[in-house]
Amino acid sequence: MRHPEEGQLLRYLDGELPGRRARQIRKHLEACWHCRAELEELQSTVGDCVRYRKNVLGTCLPPPGPWQDLSRGFDRIDASLDRESLAASLVRAIALPRPAVPWAVAGAIALVIVCTIVYQLRETPSVQAAALLQKAVAVADSRPRPARRIRISTASRQLTRVVGAGQTASDAPAIERLFRLANYNWDDPLSARSFQTWRDRLPVKRDEVATIEDPKSPDRNSYRIRTTTDASELVSATLKLRMTDFEPLEGRFEFRNRDWVEMTELTDQPTLPASTVAGATGGMPRQPGMPPDRVEAPAEPMNPAGAAEELQVVAALHQVGADLGDPVEITRDSGQILVSGTGIPPQHQKQIHEALDSMPGVVVRFSEPGGVPSGPGAPPVEPETPDLRDSAGSAPPPFQVRLEERLGGRAQFERFSSQLLDASDAIMSRAYALRRLAQQFPPDVERQLSAEDRRELRDLGREHVAALASQSGEMDAALSRILAAIGGAVPPGEVRLESAAWQPASEELLSAARRVETVLAVLLGMAPPDNPADNIPSHLLAALAQLRASQEHCQRLLSYDDVRQSR
Amino acid sequence: MPSHPLGAEVVGMIRQERNAAALRDEVGRLFEEARDDVYRYLLTLGLHPPRAQEAVQEVFLRLYAALRKGEKLDNPRAWVFRVAHNLGLKIRARQNSEAPFDPQWGEQHAGPSGNPESELLERERMSRFHSAVEGLSEQQRRCLFLRMEGLRYPEIGSALGISASTVGEFLRRAMERLKKVRYE
């Protein structure tokens, strides 16, 4: 008795076999207990899937907002189709029944009609966007602008900033640099005027305008203007304006280097827990209908928490490992240090509390993801580890076949992949942690620290680099021979490293780590290559060499304290 | 009717109006029926919830536009999932970070028995099942999720750009792994 081949039973159950084969299997099943038991097992797994879909995947329902009525969208589609068919019948009317009209004339008229329609379709959003911005600027100019606070989120951090209080302190140099490079006004980034000024300068751009309705509270209805371009470092900017008063509510900015920044206007939350935090750290996104709060520029505190205190907080977080991966943010304002985070596992929350609660002037506050508004301003999501996946039905590239052969088969390949991915993960989390440290303590802030604090800061940095080096060493050891064996060679050429301080060097290190991560994913078949002709093994060897050089450079800079040397 | 061009035009317009109204009903019905399913699928692709919800609406509007333009669709549900899949990948690429699918354990997790002990067992099993699903390859998961939504192999293949037999192979591997959860 020949049992059906692997997979045939599932196809049989799913009704995916041709009639003849299905009949054969049915007959076989009548005779064969073994296959029948197998079939029942498959059925139970199908049952598990059904329960999983309902009870596990179903927990994400219902979605965050109510479902909108589609009829407005239908109207829009009907209108645009009617325009198209009107154009078509006009062309027909002109061109077909009247041979007296010369073809050239008919053609020219048809062309004009088509061009007009295309022009309208293409230009409408631009005209709308320009008009909306113009109105918003006029409204903003017509009323006094008190200082207000905006929450700024990036992939790696969150901070709160007061704008309009005449202060232009460099509170986030890395973000500021991005905006300055893009010629976008950083002093008042969440405003219609800044958006307009940036947009007007673009020689080529594309606009989208959408209206967003909130049936629960119509005051929150807004216009969303999105402008994309290739002519600026800022490749896409989105601004949400409240319909009623054109007040900017949210903004999202995406840069050519794939960094992104989101901003939400904040308003004081009157029902904050009896927290000791005052001033500019707490707050909820602006509520509709409420006038902008008059937020005074933070007064000089008596004993302001400074960079040294912040360093102590960073060191304490490091002690409990909360600087690797957890979305913990540290903000320093009004003499307090606020440590906050969203979606941190309870166990980590407890450790963080234990580490920080005894420190004066430090406030710890966690929130759950559900309580945080979604969309722009949502907490940064940790980069997800890519998982193992098999090639998408198409033949794997030759280097992968060779790699698999070298390793001795699919199972070994998967084990190898998962080890490398773990190492790459660890490298990334160290590189991020170091970069974060560099952003918190840029050179000018570091210079103001005492020698002892500087040493502590650099010890922290060195520890990250050392851990990164050990992981990348393991990766090197696992990869270099096998890459060479499948045709990889390190291209000649010096690795250029120009940073003179460890803070910018940490950026280079992060890019190098990202490069390794990206090429590794291609090697393991988890991402398509940018260019199929690329020699991926060589690329990976080069990326590893760059990473090695970057980490050594960083370590050197961290070990050499120029302030101490110059004193 | 070449002798009454105006009459023919008017009849045509009325027919079109009626047609549009019928299509609205049809798409509206399918929207109510399938929007949660499409939304859930987009979350498993890694979209952030508000983006996923916007995308669902967009997909059904596209369905309406396609039908209005006279496209004949054998299985609109499969069409919707195919378009949702492609749109979802585009949005995911733009959103810079993936939202890992995060089930709310402890909510709506009760089994049908009402017996706390068996509920606990069921919850543990589903949690293991979830880990096993997470451990599947991206393509296996995609095939599995689309199969859960009732798509046939060729329809899944057309959504993912692979052949129906590859879908069968991915599903076989996926079921093989998931079967083992019962014996853990």
Image: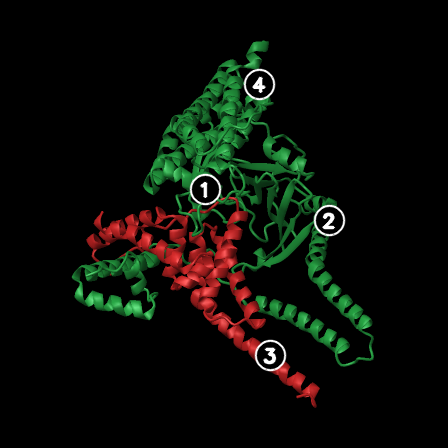
Chain colours: A green, B red
Q: Which of the 4 image quadrants contains residue A464?
A: top left
Q: How crowded is mark 1: few (under 14 residues within 10 Å), some or many (20 or more)?
A: few
The residue type indicated by label 1 comes to Pro
Q: Mark 4 lies on which chain?
A: A
Q: How far apart are the alpha carbons under marks 3 and 2?
A: 49 Å
Which of the two discs, 3 and 2, sits closer to the camera?
A: 3
Q: Mark 3 points at which residue?
A: B16
Among numbered discs 2 and 4, the one appearing first in the sequence: 2
The residue type indicated by label 4 comes to Arg
Q: Are marks 1 and 4 on the same chain?
A: yes
In what element is the residue under mark 4?
A: helix
> Is A471 drawn above or below residue B21 in the view shown?
above
Contact between marks 1 and 2 (CB within 8 A): the answer is no
In the rendering, at what x and y percent does residue A467 appear? Answer: 42, 25
Q: Do labels 2 and 4 share a chain?
A: yes
Q: Name the residue under label 2.
A: A142
Q: Name the residue under label 1.
A: A398
Pick whichever, A463 or B176, lies toward us: B176
